[in-house]
Image (cartoon, grey):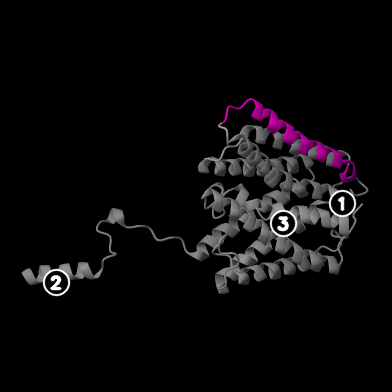
Amino acid sequence: MNMSILHDVDLVEMIPDMPATLEQAQPAPPSTRSTFLLRFGSTIALWSIALAIAFSGYEVLYFLLISVFGLLALWEFYRLLDARGLPNFKITGLLCAIVMLAGSFYYFSKLGPAQSYDFEVSVLLFFLLTVFGRQMFARLRENEPLQTMAYTLFGLLYVVWLFNFMTKILYVVPRSSTGLVMGQFYCLYLIAVTKFSDMGAYLTGMAIGRHPLIPHISPKKTWEGFFGALAFSSLASLGLFKLMPGHLTALTLTHAIVLGLLLGFAAVVGDLAESIIKRSTGAKDSGGLLPGIGGALDLIDSLLFTAPLMFFYLRLVIRVP
């Protein structure tokens, strides 16, 4: 009997990592494949809804969609700052964001891009004056006023101002002869190329990623993933150019190749930019709203850089009227 007890003790000692009770046992983490499928499914579902609204012809619904995503992402940004104890005027920032989104939709839909740049400059000035005005009524410690204004303004510029280029792309292309909006095809192109870049980076990095890209920012991102992002974005760009030649009339084969590479590169930079913010605030995701993705900011982080690039390429390189 004693030998049996000793034998059992030896077996326990030989397996030191075995949990002593069932309560201490931790559930196995989800597999990479299941995480990817959940993330991919959420992305497809969300952007399918977004594009269905854009193609519906109801421009107000498109404005509401952009506004909801923009405001949720800005709220998540300020919540990241709160979790780190970084001061900000989140309510003031959200009110400024509403003014910009609503005003931009009105000016670009009614007057077009060429007549709307004065509004853009006036909104940026409004941001600055409003945040300074809010600061005058705040009782903060000596070292906090400048930080508070800087964090608040940065959130407005990084999230709302950049994401608002989605609205501008919708209206940068002239309307049809019947008055219908035609820019939704370029929004479809932008979203597809950007998300294919994200997917290419994820899949390639997961499959063959060995060499870290910028480990002090994001240890999991690799050079293999970076080149995979460029390859997938280029293929998506060329594929859409071939599938929708009648709807992407402003593009040529050369433009499709160049834009595929540029948007793929910008998508990677956009993802890394959010990684800097999350690393600085000690967060893994910006939120838990979207299964497999995180928050609204996690969903649109790449578009924050690709949307402005697409808009200015259309305006300055292709010179869409």
| Secondary structure under the numbered disc 3 in the rendered image | helix
Q: Position of residue 21 (x, y in %)?
A: 25, 56
Q: Residues within 10 Å of mark 1 (few under 14, many from 20)?
A: many
309 or 140, nearer to the observer:
140
Q: Amino acid at mark 3?
A: Ile
Q: Is residue 116 magenta?
A: yes
Read off the residue under disc 1.
173
Question: Is the Cβ of the residue at disc 1 closer than 8 Å to that at disc 3?
Answer: no
- N-term mark: 2 or 1: 2
Read off the residue under disc 3.
191
Q: Going 65% across and 30% down the picture, which residue do you hit? A: 135
Q: Position of residue 102 (x, y in %)?
A: 76, 36
Looking at the image, is 56 positioned above or below residue 136? Answer: below
Looking at the image, is 47 positioned above or below residue 206? Answer: above
Report the magenta residues as a range. 112-140
130 or 44, nearer to the observer:
130
241 or 84, nearer to the observer:
84
| Secondary structure under the numbered disc 1 in the rendered image | loop
Q: Amino acid at mark 2?
A: His
Q: Quadrant of residue 151?
A: top right
The reply, left or right, for residue 35 in relation to residue 298 is: left
Q: Residues within 10 Å of mark 2 (few under 14, many from 20)?
A: few
- Main SS class of the magenta portion in the image: helix
